[in-house]
Amino acid sequence: QVQLVESGGGLVQAGGSLRLVCEASGRTFNIYNMGWFRQAPGKEREFVATIAWTAGSTGYEDSVKGRFTIGGDVAENTVWLQMSALKPEDTAVYYCAAQPAGAATFKYWGQGTQVTVSS
């Protein structure tokens, strides 16, 4: 089992920045990928960004490329999402997720943190 706790959400004006942090605990040695997802009201949860936990390679959803940066510290079991040039359409609950080695999908999820961008 892996436990994930997000922090750093809040209210920000359009054009502003926020940094989300996710702390992992438990069987973190078995993590293969970490990711951030988001869910806006009335919409399905969508992928935002991912990082290969040991290799460090990253991937982003098209609408956040150039504005969001995902990073991680394996020694600290922490992954973050630096969000800049925020837009009202970025408003959502943001979730941290972990994909263990051997799993086809992200298996462990945090409780989510609200990000609200005002126009």
Image (cartoon, grey):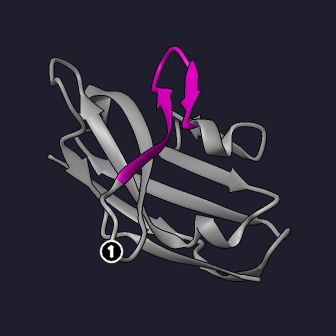
Q: Secondary structure at mark 1?
A: loop
Q: Position of residue 104 (x, y in %)?
A: 17, 23
Q: Position of residue 84 (x, y in %)?
A: 79, 57
Determine the image quadrant of residue 27: top left
Residue 71 seen = no
Q: Nearer the viewer, residue 13 or 109?
A: 13
Q: Nearer the viewer, residue 60 or 71?
A: 60
Q: Which residues are magenta?
A: 46-61
Q: Residue furthest front?
A: 42
> Relative to 24, does residue 116 appear above or below in the rendering?
below
In the image, residue 55 lies in the stretch drawn in magenta: yes
Residue 94 seen = yes
> Relative to 29, does residue 81 appear above or below in the rendering?
below
Left or right: where 66 falls relative to 8 = right
Q: Position of residue 16 (x, y in %)?
A: 83, 70
Reading the image, the residue beneath label 1 is 42
In the image, residue 14 lies in the stretch drawn in magenta: no
Q: Nearer the viewer, residue 15 or 78?
A: 15
Residue found at x 22% / y 48%: 108
Most frequent secondary structure within the magenta stretch: strand
> Relative to 19, does residue 66 appear above or below in the rendering?
above
Q: Position of residue 23 (x, y in %)?
A: 44, 56
